Amino acid sequence: MSSSQLSAVSMDPYQWRESVLSTRSLSYLSTADALAPPTHTSRNPSNAYGRRSTMDSESNYGDDLEMADAEGDTSLPRRDETGLSDVHELPESVAQCPLFTLPREIRDRIYTFCLTAAENLPIEWPHLPLANLRYGLQPQLLRTCKPIYTETGPLLYTLNTLTFHHPSDANMLVRALANPTLSRQHITNLSLHIKHTDTRLWMPYFTTTDPYRSLKADFPSLRDLGIRYRSNKWNHSLSPDANLKNCLDDTRLDEIIDSLRGIYFSPPPPQPPSSSTRGEPEHECVKPLNEMNEWEFMRFVDARRPGEDMAFKRQLLELHKAHAPQACARPDPPRVKVICACRVHSAHFNLLTSTSEGSLQQSAQQQQHGVPPPPPPPPPPPHHGHGHGHGPLGPIAALLPNLTAGATISAPESPVAASPTAVKEGEVFRGFTAVDFRAANVRKLHDPDLGSAKVARTVFAERKRVLLGLEIHCLDSASRRE
């Protein structure tokens, strides 16, 4: 066949690509291409994702290349009746696995069931050897084969909340123990437990700009950040109302909140003075071109090329979006929640949560069993004998109307304190009162060392873009007696 005949043959470059209906191969390949780092093509069949190659060490690439329209050749892979091709599919070791015959959505649900902690418990690191039994995790699934590891690796980090008690533990996990790429890209929920004696230990980790040891560098993809600060400001000799005012007046707590606000909610740097103040034209822009947003770029083009065609300007805008560095786009900050946890005496706990733990439960039980609520108290009896002098106190009773009238006149003059209202979720912080705990639900948590504990928590109020809440807990006396 001559070269002219070869050029005349119509070749479809997409003939041997995978069908869009193939959920077994494309669902895996799309994930592998997105997560795996770019690698060079290897001729070693054990390292390539695909069927075993027919080439040996002595053959060259030209020996195996065939035209797409060649006839009578049975060595080329053919499509079956369903339209699926076996080119560039899974390795032979797992190609016949029934799991990969399922759609990717079904496989993700199976992975989620195996890799999500029971009851959405936060996973503490480092953990005890038998902690996996408590969480109900099956991390050994990632060790079965590389295709499953590629699909399940991101889910393991995204579906769970990691909890750390020391900054070195957080840094070592993402830098040395876990997959650096997966952990930094897919850890979106993080919880940090800080004691009041360890604030100096955590502050350098929060405020430093070290690219290898800092909160923002180790976890750049956070969406939810929770801080549990264990305070020591609760004084058992004071009243609960006084403690509610003093426990949040903590300099160490303020230091944590200010450092987190400086990391994620710092104001933008001041803009340089405009060029018009230096006598230059107003359209002369000081900001670099690759740092402009869409509005600034279009304004820049209008100033440079007035009267230009709008279609041409839109083409320039699309080119600007494509070539502008992604680092210039500032990522959205995570939602930061700080909870101040205080251990209180059981008497204070019962006093603050009496409504939610006692009265509300009793009324709910009465409604469940059909017991009517108790009747209201009877009104006070009316006064008799005013001015008539009946009975042994007749002369004194004659003076009662004057005394009663004076009392009713002077009563409104005394100031009446308004009853506090409960704080609503997300509103501006104005302090917490006992009403906030009476509206909360009391939970019982079990610790293998300390036993059962009762916990009550307020809603979160906004304090300069950081959500702040208060938690009180005490050991359950019933569990200690047992």
Image (cartoon, helix red, strand yellow):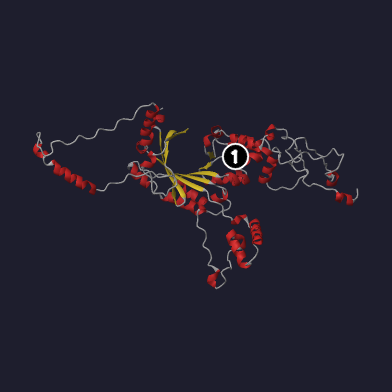
- Would residue 272 be found to the left or right of residue 236 on screen? right
Q: Which residue is mark 1?
A: 156
* Pointer 1 local density, CA inside 10 Å: few below 14, some 14–19, many at least 20: many
Total labels: the figure holds 1
Q: Amino acid at mark 1?
A: Leu
Quadrant (top left/top right/bottom left/bottom right) for the C terminus: top left
Disc 1 secondary structure class: helix
| Residue 348 location (% of width, % of height) | 35, 38
Out of 288 and 302, give the one closest to the viewer.
302
Residue under the image location 38 percent in, 39 percent down? 438
Out of 382 and 459, give the one closest to the viewer.
382
| Residue 401 location (% of width, % of height) | 14, 42
| Residue 6 location (% of width, % of height) | 87, 49
Residue sitting farthest toward the right: 1
Out of 214 and 280, give the one closest to the viewer.
280
| Residue 179 location (% of width, % of height) | 62, 44
- Would residue 94 be found to the left or right of residue 188 on screen? right
- Would residue 396 be found to the left or right of residue 145 on screen? left
The reply to whether residue 227 is visible in this rendering is: yes
Out of 143 and 460, give the one closest to the viewer.
460
User: Residue 308 occupies which quadrant of the picture?
Assistant: bottom right
User: Residue 148 occupies which quadrant of the picture?
Assistant: top right
The reply to whether residue 293 is visible in this rendering is: no
